[in-house]
Structure formats: C-alpha cells, structure tokens
Image (cartoon, rainbow, N blue to C red):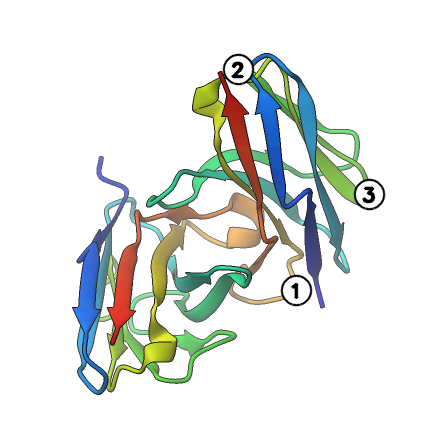
Amino acid sequence: EDQVTQSPEALRLQEGESSSLNCSYTVSGLRGLFWYRQDPGKGPEFLFTLYSAGEEKEKERLKATLTKKESFLHITAPKPEDSATYLCAVGDGGTSYGKLTFGQGTILTVHP
Amino acid sequence: NAGVTQTPKFRVLKTGQSMTLLCAQDMNHEYMYWYRQDPGMGLRLIHYSVGEGTTAKGEVPDGYNVSRLKKQNFLLGLESAAPSQTSVYFCASTPLGGDLYGYTFGSGTRLTVV
C-alpha cells in the first residue's frame, strides 16, 4: 500500500527565511509525484508534477525536487502570501482509475 | 474556463436528511472523483468514475451514492445524513489517469450534519 508522509506538520517562517518541506513516499512504482497548494476554504491548487528521480521544477519562489524516496519543496525568501497548506501526492499506476495517495500536508505560515 | 465547479459551497443538514452535491467540469475530462477532507485524516476517496455511466467505490463509500449520467457532471448523494459525514467534500477530475496527470479540484462543499 502506498504511503506518503509529510514533515513538518506545521512550519512558521519569517518573511525572507528560506526553508524546505519534505514528502517521503513508499510506492511500488512511481508514476508521478504531485505538489498542491491549498488555501483556507479552497480546493487544492496544482503546483508541480515530478516523474523521475533527479527531476526539478521551479515556479517563482518554489522549487520541487525528487529522489527515489522523497521529494522536497524548497521555498526561497518566502512572503506572507506563500502561507498555505502544501499537499504532496503520489500515483503508482497500480489502479485502473488513476488513484493518488495524499499526505497529511504541511501548514506553512510566513510572518511579515 | 470555469474548471471544476461544486455546488453548494456550504450546507447544514439535520441527521437523517438527504442531499445531493453537484460537481460539474467543463474540461472534457474522463475521470472524476469525490473526496472528503477531515482534520488529521487527509483526503480520502469516496467514489470515482472513469467515464460517463460508470461509477465505483473508493476507500470510504459507506453512506454515499454517486451517479454520472453525463460526462461533465458527477453527483454525490447522502441518503440519510449522519454527524460522521460532517466534512469538506472535494470533487476532482483528470483527462485520463490521475496518477500521471494529477487532478483538478473544485473549491469544495463544507457540510455540517447536526
């Protein structure tokens, strides 16, 4: 059974203080790893897809990386508007319906 | 382009009442999903559909029914609401396998059962 563990559960940063969020996963065969951002009262919003170890994707202050066992979401010089819950999910191709297994999320708070 | 639209956004039900949550997508996606999100439990799959006229059970299907009569719509029904069904419900869609393309989510329905 696929497992996704995100750490830390919550992270508080000062504006400009760079840090990383971790997503550790166990799957039989990774088909895709996904990062989502979720603002309070809203649905998850797609950020990145990573398909193979060594792959990296960037968007503004965010950079996602992937190894065979984990993914990191690096946040460089964060701003208060980066405050949100960040969700990680994996797909393993083991179902006929494209199941994603989600982690519990990391709640990021960036103080001005 | 609206993406995935869920209605209603909020609802309060009394125990035993029934209701239907509507999900509509305008992206011509084949696959659609219903999830519930609860504190400490993450996102859990209730039911899914891989095409018009097809539905199947996910991880937590008890107490829910679904229908997909039209490709663009996926309905989630609660026949007799229970307090344990208090949650935030999300609909998602994907063109083919979500494990390769990821999901597009709706904005959610916050349901309270009293």
The answer to which quarter of the image holds residue B74 is bottom left
Please state which amino acid type lies under the numbered disc 3. Answer: Lys
Closest to the observer, B54 or A26: A26
A2 vs B30, left or right, is right
Q: In the displayed structure, would residue A52 be above or below residue B89?
A: above
Name the chain letter of the residue that bears numbered label 3: A
Which label belongs to residue A94? 1
Q: Secondary structure at mark 1?
A: loop
In the rendered image, residue B52, in percent from the top left (x then y), is placed at: 30, 67
Name the chain letter of the residue that bears numbered label 2: A
Going 55% across and 60% down the picture, which residue do you hit? B40
Circle 2 crowding by C-alpha within 10 Å: few under 14, some 14–19, many from 20: few
Circle 3 crowding by C-alpha within 10 Å: few under 14, some 14–19, many from 20: few
Label 2, label 3: how far apart the Cα atoms are: 25 Å
Circle 1 crowding by C-alpha within 10 Å: few under 14, some 14–19, many from 20: some
Going 50% across and 65% down the picture, which residue do you hit? B44
Q: Nearer the viewer, mark 1 or mark 3?
A: 3
Going 59% across and 12% down the picture, which residue do you hit? A16
Which label belongs to residue A60? 2
Please state which amino acid type lies under the numbered disc 2. Answer: Glu
Q: In the displayed structure, would residue B90 be above or below residue B114?
A: above
Q: Secondary structure at mark 3?
A: loop
The answer to which quarter of the image holds residue B61 is bottom left
Question: Mark 3 sits on what residue?
Answer: A68
In the rendered image, residue A42, in percent from the top left (x then y), is placed at: 34, 44
In the rendered image, residue A65, in percent from the top left (x then y), is placed at: 71, 30
Residues flagged by tags 2 and 1 on a common chain: yes
Q: Nearer the viewer, mark 2 or mark 1?
A: 2
Label 2, label 1: how far apart the Cα atoms are: 33 Å
